[in-house]
Image (spheres, helix red, strand yellow):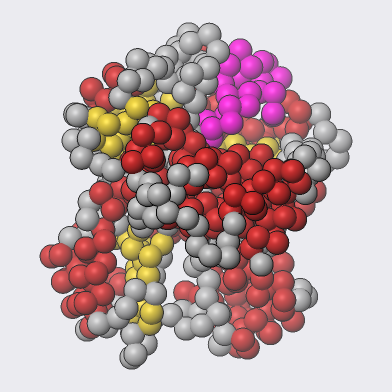
Amino acid sequence: MKQFIQDLAETNRYQATHLLHILRGVQSRFHYIPEQAIEQIAELLKISRTQIIGVIEFYSFFHLKPRGQYELLISDSITDHMLGKQSLINYLSEKLTVAVGEVRQDGVVSLDNTSCTGMCDQGPAGLVNGYALTRLDRTRIDQITDLINQQKPLDQWPGELFQVEDNIIEPGLLLSQSINQGSALQSAFKRGLKETLIELDKSGLRGRGGAGFKTATKWKFCSEEQGNQRYVICNADEGEPGTFKDRVLLNSYAHRVFEGMTLCAAIIGAQQGFLYLRGEYLHLYDKLQSVLDERRQAGFLGNNILKEGLNFDIEICLGAGAYICGEESALIESLEGKMGIPRNRPPYPVTQGYLGKPTVVNNVETFIAAASIAVKGGDWFANVGTEKSKGTKILSICGDCSRPGIYEYPFGTSIQSVLNDCGARDVLGIQIGGPSGTFISNKEFDRKLAFEDLATGGSFIVFNNSRNILDIVNNFTHFFAHESCGFCTPCRVGTALLKKQLDKIVEGHGSAGDVVALEELCQLIKTQSHCGLGQTAANPVLTTLERYPELYQSQLKNISYEPGFDLDGALETARRLAKRNDAGAHLAQVEE
């Protein structure tokens, strides 16, 4: 162990910013992070052991106690539940003779739930030692059980167990076009970097991660910041349940992603870039490293790119199971080797990002679009879409439809058109933008895909009329309570209270005032939370309560609260204190 960790630290140049790389290596080798490893890492990286323990406890893929030699995690996403996940994990638990959340007595295997694995179009899905397992059924579980009991190494398992398909069904402006490696950079240098930024501005490209900030403006702001050190980060931590488009784009369009990052580096004057890849996409890591090597050999990465004096390279950092790291400032903290706790903003990353330096953070789809615009020009992109939403949007579509997969549509496309294409029938509603987004009912399918109407990071989960809306909301609410980073009281305590309050209603134990109390609790979490996770955690309740109030009321019984807990009184006090910006302090008292 001592020599292994020494080698890991040396490979990572003894940099504390590479703590996640090192911990992932230790976890993979020993299936937990031993105490002696923590002590040695602290000494080698010159950081405190308490900082290391904090990081280990923050990320769900790290453990302080031994896990099985085969770490099995089954996705708990709503789409997996719709495909019979619960009965499958029960069957798997029985076959392996290990309880969910436990390690088998012989130490060979452990079994647990995990949040969405990004395989929503081919579930039920899971992970074994970090590698994706797709289309699980009883036959595959029998096969997996036999392989584990024989202690067969993963590289001897049948390849079909790990097969991940792209499922690109409806390519559009971006996905149907091919551009040669290096052509975006060649076009930009030929046209001029300032002129290329003007083309990007003319295109109207806005960030495709959901917030929709204008891309050219962000790059311009960063380029104008003082100092010589700037960074480019690609956010590939798509942890939103129902979203898997970045997985496909990185698998089939990685060259264009890296081209877009390099284009950004040329415009803003950066020398270092990072691709922050969600831990669930471990299966893509080696392939992406090969693409980077190929680009270096071709002269599109490294020193003096295209002999234009541009020095730029890209490093891949794997996450470790933390949904919050999809938020850009939390992602930057994670890249620095820390817990992924969102920063106070301002300052924004464009002025003070990675290591306090000006940093551009964009998502995978945005960089692909930017590379294409550099080749095709701003008008090519701007002529598609609506006045306020230019170009196209790539969607991950899953749930109750016959053709789940990747679709690309011009902005302005109606929701009904999307449903027709994906084979959705007898639709109850759609969760747009994942749990943090909006639930729309079947009376709203004439609405449009656009920033001015239905903005989305790219997730559509379709539900037919056989589904129970409260089951869906309950799954999402439990997801947010589990994924809260715990930094601020309104989110940490509020999501836990929201989960308990909703459980009470769903289980039929709610009283007449519980729905009102539920909505008020939602508003407190939304208005008082530190970052976007807490600010959107109540959306599943609020958007469905607005559309289906009768469903919530139908669950109620005329009973009183449990003795000793006056939620109405607690909320009334919190409402008063919220006016003095002290709701968080009161919620802490409620927690105690």
Quarter where residue 37 is shown: bottom right
Residue 112 x/y as whole percent: 37, 70
In the image, farthest residue toward the right: 226
Taking the magenta stretch, the answer to whether it contains residue 484 is: no
Residue 188 x/y as whole percent: 61, 23
Q: How many marks?
A: 0
Residue shown at 58% from the left, 45% from the top: 521
In the image, farthest residue toward the left: 139
Residue shown at 18% from the left, 35% from the top: 402
Nearest the eye: 458 or 508? 508
Residue shown at 45% from the left, 13% from the top: 385
Up/down of 137 relative to 26, above or below: above
Chain part drawn in magenta: 194-219
Residue 210 seen anywhere in this rendered image of the structure: yes
Up/down of 4 relative to 414, above or below: below
User: Is residue 504 shown left or right of residue 330?
Assistant: left
Residue 81 x/y as whole percent: 28, 53
Residue 240 seen anywhere in this rendered image of the structure: no
Quarter where residue 489 is shown: bottom right
Residue 95 x/y as whole percent: 20, 77
User: Is residue 543 shown left or right of residue 151?
Assistant: right
Residue shown at 32% from the left, 20% from the top: 443
Up/down of 505 relative to 220, above or below: below
Nearest the eye: 341 or 42? 341
User: Is residue 249 shown left or right of residue 424?
Assistant: right
Nearest the eye: 236 or 89? 89
Location of the N terminus (image quadrant): bottom right
Up/down of 327 relative to 497, above or below: above
